[in-house]
């Protein structure tokens, strides 16, 4: 199908133009409600749209939301910076 799954967070990356409908907005994050298939094009329905459960949107107009896990990395860096330093460094002799 499209590589997406139900419950996945996605972001709209391409505009839809349908007057009189609530359409996904570029840059907005949505949750996949259901996977669909129409005219041989994979689609998804979206929880956050009032008509999202009835209308399928082309999945190629979305990409998965990438959650950055920088907090863990930053915590490790902070720990390294706050460790005790050696008070009396050992002299190094270079030959």
Image (tube, rainbow, N blue to C red):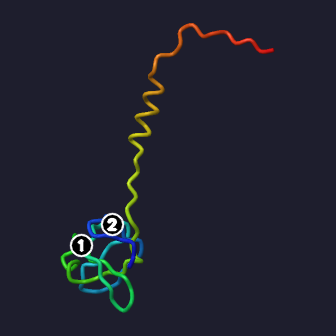
> At 41% across and 75% down in the image, what residue appears?
14
In the image as oriented, which residue stretches furthest toward the left? 50
Q: Position of residue 45 (x, y in %)?
A: 26, 77
Q: Which residue is mark 2?
A: 28
- The foreground one among 68 and 6 is 6
> At 81% across and 14% down in the image, what residue appears?
95
**Label number found at residue 33:** 1
In the image as oriented, which residue stretches furthest toward the top? 88
**Label 2 near label 1: C-beta < 8 Å?**
no
Q: Position of residue 62 (x, y in %)?
A: 39, 72
**Label number found at residue 64:** none
Q: Position of residue 24 (x, y in %)?
A: 31, 74
Q: Is residue 75 above or below residue 45?
A: above
Classify mark 1: helix, strand or loop.
strand
Q: Position of residue 1 (x, y in %)?
A: 38, 79
> At 38% across and 41% down in the image, what residue appears?
71
Q: Is residue 68 above or below residue 38?
A: above
**Structural crowding at the residue carrying mark 2, measured as other residues with C-alpha within 10 Å and reported as few (<14), some (14–19) or many (≥20):** few
| 91 left or right, relative to 2 | right
């Amino acid at each position: 199908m499209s590589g997406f799954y139900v419950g996945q967070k996605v972001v709209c990356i391409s505009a839809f133009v349908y007057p009189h409908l609530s359409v996904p907005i570029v840059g907005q994050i949505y949750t996949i409600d259901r996977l669909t298939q129409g005219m041989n094009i994979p689609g998804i329905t979206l929880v956050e749209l009032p008509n999202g459960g009835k209308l399928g949107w082309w999945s190629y107009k979305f990409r998965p939301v990438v959650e950055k896990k920088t907090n863990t990395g930053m915590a490790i860096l902070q720990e390294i910076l706050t460790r005790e330093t050696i008070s009396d460094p050992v002299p190094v002799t270079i030959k």
